[in-house]
Amino acid sequence: MTSSAKYVYTYIVRRNEEVTRASLPVLPCACANLRRAARAVTRLYNQALRPDGIEITQFTLLMALSITGETSQGELADLLALDSTTLTRTLSLTRGRRWIHVRQGRDRRQRLVSLTATGQEKLQQAMPHWTQAQQDLQRAVGRETFAHLGGLLAVTAARSVS
């Protein structure tokens, strides 16, 4: 006699004693934990930036171009750790709004991307809401955790890039 019952084994790790009932469990997969955190943080920033008509992906692109100045699309993809399809979609949206300018580089394959005056204005307009989101996140995770978070994530991204 065969049984049609199926058993599922679930393994959830709780490594931190500070985990409360309101907290989410630590998953056994680092990628799943990072992606879950990224979705939650993205939601926080998008809600803050909504009045400015910009999403955090677009804001990040404008901020990166503000820091780097004109740069190639490839260098921008490396800086933001984005695949070419995702970057192309974000560039298309921001270009359509005249926030960025894209021009041909030294050869036909190279594209150089820069921030326009309109893009700089949009960045400055959204900056107070972005700052508020930063403060909200810091308050939610604590000052010390927030201070370490940026560096830890930068090291993780740098060491994970192949």
Image (tube, rainbow, N blue to C red):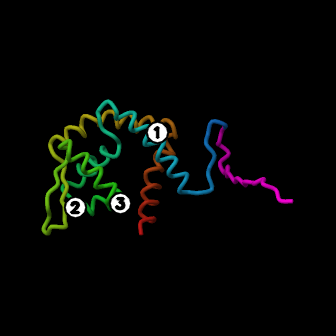
Q: Residue furthest top?
A: 51
Residue 79 quadrant: bottom left
Crowd class of label 1 (few under 14; some 14 to 19; many from 20; radius 10 Å): some
Task: Where is residue 8? Give x, y as percent.
Answer: 72, 54
Q: Which residue is mark 2?
A: 72
Residue 135, magenta (yes or no): no
Q: Secondary structure at mark 2?
A: strand
Q: Residue at x 28, y 58 (%)?
A: 76
Earlier-in-chain disc, 2 versus 1: 2
Task: Where is residue 40? Give x, y as percent.
Answer: 48, 42
Give the position of the C terminus as an image quadrant.
bottom left
Task: Where is residue 61? Give x, y as percent.
Answer: 29, 49
Q: Is residue 90 left or right of residue 113?
A: right
Crowd class of label 3 (few under 14; some 14 to 19; many from 20; radius 10 Å): few
Q: Secondary structure at mark 3?
A: loop
Residue 18, magenta (yes or no): yes
Q: Which residue is mark 1?
A: 138
Instruction: Tell me where the magenta segment starts and ends, as one range.
Output: 1-20
Q: CA distance from mark 3 to mark 2?
A: 14 Å
Q: Which residue is mark 3?
A: 83
Amino acid, disc 2: Ser
